[in-house]
Image (tube, grey):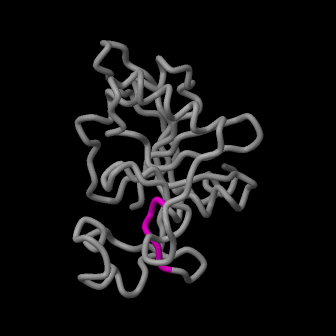
Amino acid sequence: MESLFARATRVNVISYPLPSGDVIQVRRLCVHFGRATPGHLKTGTLQPTYTSKPLVSFQGDAMFGELALLRWLEVDGWYGVWVDTGHGRKLWHEMPTRATPVALPPAQQAIHDRIVVANGGRAGGFFDVMAWRGNHTIFVEYKGADERAPKNEAAWIDAALHAGVSTNDLLIVRNE
């Protein structure tokens, strides 16, 4: 995560209240990803829930912010996916306009499944990027400048912690 931290304009720790009543501390990075041109996918290219998402630039390539986060993690040797729960639990490694969904390796699938079970069978609220390097798996939530946490995010965090994920492996990245 060294390259992602190096991009941060600000790093802080935020208190995050959970449905269980616990309050955890989560690291939040503020970064600035350049805007892509054009700023959105062409209407009709994919479902409106995709084409309304702003595009950012990573090394001159236009992509969703979640995939830009993944690219920065890959610079440091991480592997991962965008966990797209908004479109039927799809996992993406590339833009949906250029690729098909991918599958998780068995160890990461087991972690994913433990969290979903702990969350009552729901994947909603799952952090956007799941990445791994060796035996270490992390979860990174991407927030655009005006994006707020969905209601189900706190429940997902609670479930992830109950499934054995450490708060040290949770990270929020806000694009400002």
Q: Position of residue 134 (x, y in %)?
A: 77, 40
**As drawn, is 102 to the left or to the right of 117?**
right
Q: Position of residue 137 (x, y in %)?
A: 64, 37
Q: Is residue 19 above or below residue 71?
A: above
Residue at x-position 62% and y-position 61%:
72
Q: Is residue 67 magenta?
A: no
Residue at x-position 70% and y-position 51%:
78
Residue furthest toward the top? 21
Residue at x-position 44% and y-position 70%:
96
- The span picked out in magenta is 62-66
Residue at x-position 32% and y-position 21%:
18
Dominant SS of magenta comes to: strand
Figure quadrant of the C terminus: bottom left
Q: Position of residue 29 (x, y in %)?
A: 50, 48
Give the quadrant of residue 90. Answer: bottom left
**As drawn, is 128 to the left or to the right of 42?**
right
**As drawn, is 126 to the left or to the right of 136?**
left
Comparing 129 with 31, the one in front is 129
Give the quadrant of residue 93. Answer: bottom right
